[in-house]
Amino acid sequence: LIKQHANQQRGANQLRDYVYNTVLSYMAKDRRWKEALQLLRSMQDHQQQQQPKDQTVGHPFPNSGTYHNVIQACINAGQTEQAIQTMLAVVEQRKKKKNNNNNDIITLATFQVLLSAVSKRKNWRRALQILDVMIDQEDLQPNERTYNAVISACARAGENGAARNVYARMRRANIKPTVVTFNSLMAAYPGTPRWRETLTLLGECNREPGVEPNLITYTTAIRACATGKKISTALTLLDVIKEKNLGPDVICYTAVMDACSKGNNWRKSLELLEEMRAKGMEPTEVTYSVAIAACGVGLQWQKSLDLLNEMRQKGLKPNAIVYNNAISALAKAAKRNSHLSVKAHAPGRFSREQQQRQMDSFTPDVDTRQLWKQAMKLLDQMKADGIELDGYSYSSAISACGHGGRWKEALELIRQMKEGGPKTRPNRVAYTAAITACGRSGEWKHALELFDTMRNEGLQPDRVAYNALVFSLRVGRRPNEAYEIWSEMCGKTQGISRTTTTTTKKYASARADQKHILPDEITVSEIIATLHRTAIGRPNSTRIDEVFSEAVKRGIFLNPNSLNSMWEVDLSGMPLPVASAACRFVLNNILRIAQASGTSPPDKDVQFITGTGKSHAVNGGDDDEGTTTTLREHVRGILSEEFDPPLYATIPKRAQGTVVIRNAVLQKWISSKVA
C-alpha cells in the first residue's frame, strides 16, 4: 500500500505519518531492520526533494516517532551499532538545518532505548558518547534514568572509575540520585579487589535524603562480603533485611551462603539452606552450587554428593560449575585424608595423645581410596549429561587420584585432556596435580616427564609446579635432579628438557629471577631434605650449605628483618636437615668474621631457639622410618658430632627451649680453626 501511495499524483488520498509509523512499529517487532531503514531513507529522500511544508505527494516526512521505531527495529535485531549510527546521522543533519522542527528530533525515550541496549552489551564507551550527544541538545537534557543507564553500562563493563565519573557529573547537574543509581554503582565492585567500595556506597545510600536501600542494594553488598570473606557483615545485613521486612529471596540467601562458604563457615551455609526451605523457598541451581562448594570447604564430600542427587530428584540439571564443585569437594577430602593417614600412622612423630586424635579423625567412612572412584564417576556422569568437561573438572579429578595413590589414572586423565578440545587441553594446574600424583607414588620419572612435557607445550611452570616436582624427586631420592631444579629456580642455569632429545620442540624455559618461580620455604626444605637423605659423602653436604646460603641471601630463612641476629637464632619450626644447615651457616659466618678481622668475637653466647616441641623424623620426610628426635636434642647432637672440636651446648633451666653455646666453648672452637 505504501509503494502504491508513493506513486500517486497530487490530490490523492494521503497516508499520514502515523500510518507509516504504525508500519515501522510492526517492522520493529518483527526485527525487520533492513526494511525499516529502507523506508526511512525513502521518507528522507522525499523530504530533501520537497519544500519543508509540501507533503501532499508521496511519503510523509520522518518525525520523532519514525526515528524511534527504526532505531527500535535495529536494536531488536541485534544491530545496536546501526541504531547508534542512525541516531548520530539524525543529530548531525539537524545541526545543519537553520530552522529546527520539534518533530524532527530524537526523543528522550529513544535515547533511553539506545542506552539500555548498549548497557546490556557492556559497551560503556558508546554509552558515554550517547550521554554527551544528549547534553549537546538544546531542547533535550538527561534525567536520572539517563544517568542511571550510563552508570549501569560502565558498571557492567567493570569500568568502576567511569561509573564514578558519571555519578559525579550527575551530581554537578543537580540531578538527585535514586536507589537505582546506588544499585548501579554498587554492581561494579562485588567480585573485584575493590569490593569494599560496595559497602562504602551502601553507607552513602543510607545517608542520602529520601533514598532508602532496597533488597537489591543489600544483596549486592552481601555479594561484596562474599568476595571479602566477611561472614559477620553478611549475616548482619541479612538481619537488617529481615528487620526492614524487605523479604529476603532466594538470590539474597544464596549470596549469604556464598559469603559463609568463602569464609570457611560451611555449617552456617547449610543452616541457611535449611532456613530457606523452612520458609518455602525452592533452591535454584546456583543455590545448590554454592551449597556444594561449602561442603567442599568443610571436607563434607558425602553431603556434596547428597545435594547433587537432590538436585536431580527435583528436576534441576547440574551444570559444569555444580559438577566441578562436587569433584573439588572430593579432591579436598582426599588431600586431607591422605595427610591424616600419614600423620596418624607415622611412628614417633607425635605424642600418644596427638596420634589418638589423628586416628579418631581418620574414620573408615572417608576412605581415601574410594574418593578417586567417586570423582571418576562424576566425570562419566558429566559426559552422559552432555556437559563438556573443562580444565577444572579434570584437574580436580587428577588431584583426587593423586592423593589416592592412583598415578596411572592421573596420567590417563592427562591423555584424555590432550585428545579433547581447546577447553580441555592440559593447563598448568592439571599438570601440577598429575606431577603431585606421580610424586606421592614415588614415580619420579613420570613426574619429570610431565614437567618437561608441560614446558614443551609452551606452559611456564610456576612455583607450585616446581615444588611438586621437587617433592617427587625427594620421594624418589634423586638429589642430582633436585639440585638442577634448584639452580633453574634461582636463575643460575637455563631450563633443559631431561626426558627428550628432540630439538624441534619449544618450551617455556625458566627465566632468571621470575617472581612466579622464585623458591620459597617449601622449596628449600624439600631440596635440603632430598640432599640430606642421600648425602653419603662431602659433595651433597656442600650443596646443602650452598642451598641454605642462597636461601638466606633471598630472605627465605634467617631474615634480617626478624628477631634473628648472629648471636640469637630462631630455629623453631624448621625441619631437622634445615636446622642443621642453619647451625652450620651461623657458626661458619661467625668464624669467617673472626678470621677476616683477626680479633676474637665479642664476649657473647650463641643461642639457638628450638622450643621443646614434637618429635621429628631424623631425615625430615613424611615416609621416613627409623629413629626420631626433638629439634632441641637434634641441634645439641650436630653441635657435638659435626664440629671439631665438639661444641658442647647447654640448656638453661629457665629456658628449656633454647640451646646455648657458651662463649668459652665458642672461643676454643674459633681458636682451633684460626691456628
Image (cartoon, rainbow, N blue to C red):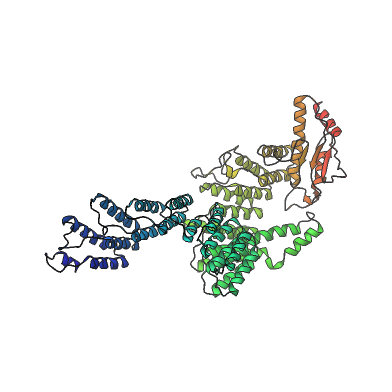
Q: Is residue 604 left or right of residue 291?
A: right
Q: Nearer the viewer, residue 341 or 201?
A: 201
For the image shown, how many numbered marks are present on the structure? 0
Quarter of the figure that contains the N terminus = bottom left
Using the rendered view, name the quadrant where residue 601 is placed.
top right
Q: Is residue 75 visible?
A: yes
Where residue 481 appears, as percent x and y from the top left, is 64, 44
Vertical order, 381 against 582 (above or below):
below
Using the rendered view, name the quadrant where residue 654 is placed.
top right
Where residue 204 appears, as percent x and y from the top left, is 53, 55
Q: Residue at x 59, y 44 (%)?
A: 517
Q: Is residue 350 left or right of residue 518?
A: right
Where residue 390 appears, as percent x and y from the top left, is 51, 59
Using the rendered view, name the quadrant where residue 191 is placed.
bottom right
Q: Nearer the viewer, residue 392 or 507?
A: 392
Quarter of the figure that contains the C terminus = top right
Where residue 604 appears, as percent x and y from the top left, is 82, 33
Q: Residue at x 26, y 53 (%)?
A: 94
